[in-house]
Image (spheres, rainbow, N blue to C red):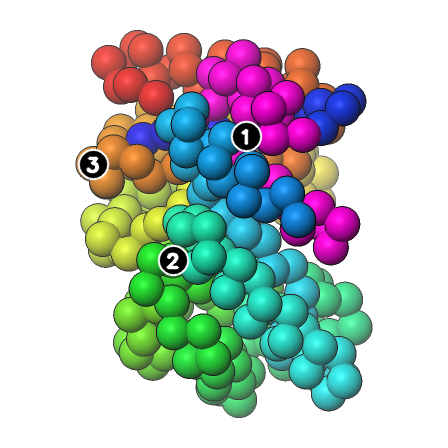
Amino acid sequence: MRLGGQVFVEDKNPDSWSAALLTAGFRATVCPVNSEEELGLLGDYVKAAAKHDIVISEVGAWSNPISSDEDARRSAIAYCTERLALAEEIGANCCVNIAGSRGVKWDGPDRDNFNDETFELIVDTVRGIIDAVKPKRTVYALEMMPWIFPDSADAYLQLIQAIDRPGFGVHFDPVNIVCSPRIYYRNGDLIRDFVLRLGPHIRNCHAKDVLLRDRLTAHFDEVIPGQGMLDYAVFLTELNKLHPDTPLIIEHLHSNEDYSQAAAYIRSVANGLGIAL
């Protein structure tokens, strides 16, 4: 697999960006271009990544294409379609989003998120996005969340079957579905089961950690890798069974120092297992 993350560069350009990734020891990263102003440099970023053997793992399409607000929904679908086309253009491993939410908050819980109508809406929406682009080099994938489909291996398999498109793939972030103490203490079993059943479809993974707090009711915090209970020995062992270029992207940190700390922990576990990153 390829360990990756983001880098913070004061004077960001394709050369300084790729140099910072090399210094960090990252062999994969997310799409460096997010604003309209940067799109003109996209080709230069892609060339810099290719020159240094850096895989662009994902293009984010963070939005709510199942919003109950129809204007917001149409706008999000257009954005997802645009981002999937961008992922296809640059050959990113995937274009990733969450399914969305029927509630007010685009990535929040709602009482309607798990009904049959919402499942069908997700299926129709994802089909529409994929059919508009017809990707060949990339896939559209849904990051798992605790309060919307897909929230488990079972739900992901059901979506793959229902969507029935080769342009639909799997994004694996186990921390997002560690939502009970039983799963928390047995998360290695969750990881093994997920990779066993969905491994051939996995195009991208996220690296973070989870910590159960000792107050009622069950309360979980996302923390830097190494500060929680995610079973990284199992996580890395299972991911090592996948395609050797499968990215594992450290995310949600706020400084180069934090990314360096997280990477050092993951590398230490990998080294103990004899796994190359």
Asked if residue 21 lies in the magenta stretch, the reply is yes
Identify the mark nearer the N-term, 2 or 1. 1
The answer to whether residue 151 is seen in the rendering is no
98 and 152: which is toward the camera: 98
Q: Is residue 169 above or below residue 265?
A: below
Measure the C-alpha gap from mark 1 to mark 3. 21 Å
Asked if residue 17 lies in the magenta stretch, the reply is yes
Give the residue pinned by disc 2.
138
Element class at badge 3: loop
108 and 245: which is toward the camera: 245
Identify the mark nearer the N-term, 1 or 3. 1
Q: Percent position (x, y) of residue 24?
A: 54, 16
Give the amino acid at mark 1.
Answer: Gly
**Cβ–Cβ below 8 Å for labels 2 and 1?**
no
Give the amino acid at mark 3.
Answer: Lys
Residue 5: which numbered mark, if any?
1
Which corner quadrant of the image does residue 9 belong to? top right
Q: Nearer the viewer, mark 1 or mark 3?
A: 1
- Compared across the picture, whether 3 is left or right of 37 comes to left
Q: Is residue 120 above or below residue 183?
A: below
The answer to whether residue 91 is seen in the rendering is yes
Identify the mark nearer the N-term, 2 or 3. 2
Give the amino acid at mark 2.
Answer: Thr
Give the residue pinned by disc 3.
241
Residue 107: which numbered mark, if any?
none
Element class at badge 2: loop
Q: Percent position (x, y) of residue 223?
A: 63, 30
- Compared across the picture, whether 225 is left or right of 141 comes to right
Q: Magenta span covers which residues?
A: 13-39
